[in-house]
Image: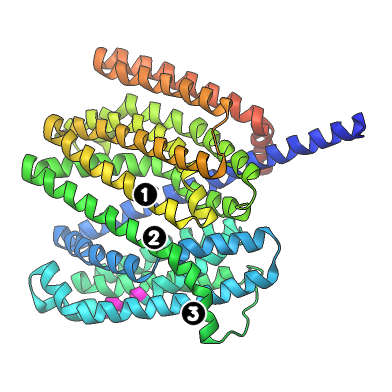
Amino acid sequence: MTSKPDTLIQEARSVDQEQASYRQIFKATSIFGGVQVFQILIGIVRTKFVAILLGTTGVGIMGLFNAPLQLILSLTGLGITFSAVRDISEAYGNSDQNKLNHTVTTLRRWSWIAGVLGLLVTVALSPLLSRWTFGTNEYTWAFIWLSLTMLLQTISNGQKTVIQGTRRLKDLAKANVYGSLAGLLTAVPLYYYFGLKGIVPSLILTALTGLLLSFYFVRKAQYKSIQMSWKETVTAGKNMIKLGLIITVTGIIGFFTGYILNAFISRIGGVDQVGLYNAGWSIIGQSTGLVFAAMTTDYFPRLSAINKDDLQIRSLVNQQAEMVMFILTPILILLIGAMPVVVRILYSAEFLPVIDFSNWMLMGILIKGLVWPVGFIFPAKGDLRVFGIVEISAMTFNVLTNVIGYFFFGLTGLGISFILNYSFGLFITLIFAQRKYGFKYGTIVIKSFILNLILVILVFICTFLLESNIRYAVASLMLIISAVYSFKELDRRMNLKTIILNFLKIRR
């Protein structure tokens, strides 16, 4: 029979473990949210230099190079980096050094295979890529040289996967930040001295510096390369490739659904409408993507490490969903309330018609905050069939609702369809998660979601009913309420006040 003191000790340990988990989520979100902000700023500065030094032609050429190359990279990469994170995280979480060494060695070899495949495909298609992209054979050699970036980026991504899977988050953040900065510092002189001819060398140098940094930081990960025959390498890589191919296929479907929607908007509404749609997506993606990028980087490895324990999974998914809502809601309220100002700052008054579409989307983002945490359960468990069914069903539904929404209601219809899409995604994801693994969201998560949703809806309604000055005042009040509520909830879960005070003391 357990004594009362023992029970109290166990409860205290449970509370400490829960606080540690919340703090880890908050730490990862802070680190990689900051990394995302830095990379966005670097991207803006780089684009500005390109615009000044190379003009609109340079901006266009860079965009035309990147689009087909990124598609080839995703196809030939076989999705092995995503699937390898799961295997490495599981081995690392279980302190299985033998499996970790085996998995890392397999990943590194397959990274070389995928990288060489990407290089050869790009070289083989270079004349076609030049004609399809630029309408001339003049850029064939440019694509041949850029094939090197396929090899460099694929190997670099493999190294970063090892860093991510072994939970070296600060090293991963440093690799990304230093890579972005090095890319900027090497590119600008090339643009200045060589003009348009400096674009291809700059892209190669950026990929090379990223590779060198990944090699430097991966050395700190605790693993050893082992001797394996190529037959063993192929056999060991099969499971990685199976999950990776599902990721690749869903990525291809996502690419084509995006292409179909852009083509449909262009056909029905014209090129200007396509520009507004993509501007809205850019605003939402850059501002809220910080939270979701952190989730992908830190949360998926943690979930993979406990993928065989359904109770731990349920606890972690609920914790992640709570943290996402508390961090995301103030951002959503700020954006909805200040969207006219945001559009003018990032674009111009010409893009103001995108406001309604963007605000509808922002309400859907809160639902996305519930879908994503539970959606990672399937790849973490390696459940390829269910993962494929959920992803393809959701994408099919998305295409239908987007086309119907735009046809009848224009850009506003796309915003509404965004909410419907994630509502459907939440519905189908929860059904499979509950039936397969007995997962369900706890009462605390549901109550928090409803309260945050009410705050977001109130601000959304204000944007339609109130004049600008009153609207900004009400939105500011809602933002304060949301921020105070989120702070109190975060403090209750992880003692946020103490963290902030300790941080300030260190800075002194």
Residue 428, by quadrant, is top left
The answer to whether the residues at label 1 and label 3 have Cβ atoms under 8 Å apart is no
Q: Secondary structure at mark 2?
A: helix
Give how far apart the Cα atoms at labels 2 and 1 are: 9 Å
Quick check: 202 left or right of 138? right
Q: Position of residue 129 (x, y in %)?
A: 17, 73
Quick one: label 1 or label 3, which is nearer the N terminus? 3
| Residue that badge 2 annotates | 246
Q: Amino acid at mark 2?
A: Ile
Q: Amino acid at mark 1?
A: Glu
Quadrant in which the N terminus is drawn: top right
Does residue 474 sit above or below 422 in this rendering? above
Q: Position of residue 286 (x, y in %)?
A: 35, 44
Residue at position x 63%, y 52% in the image: 308
Quick check: 321 left or right of 147? right
Does residue 486 sit above or below 47 in this rendering? above
Viewer-nearest residue: 316 or 242: 242
Residue at position x 29%, y 71% in the image: 190
Give how far apart the Cα atoms at labels 1 and 3 are: 27 Å
> Which segment is the magenta one?
145-150
Could you classify mark 3 by the number of other residues whose Cα lies within 10 Å: few (under 14), some (14-19), or many (20 or more)? some
Residue at position x 28%, y 55% in the image: 253
Give how far apart the Cα atoms at labels 3 and 2 are: 18 Å
Could you classify mark 1 by the number of other residues whose Cα lies within 10 Å: few (under 14), some (14-19), or many (20 or more)? many
Q: Which circle marks residue 391 in the picture?
A: 1
Q: Say if residue 278 shows up in the picture.
A: yes
| Residue that badge 3 annotates | 234
Quadrant in which the C terminus is drawn: top right
Residue 99, by quadrant, is bottom right
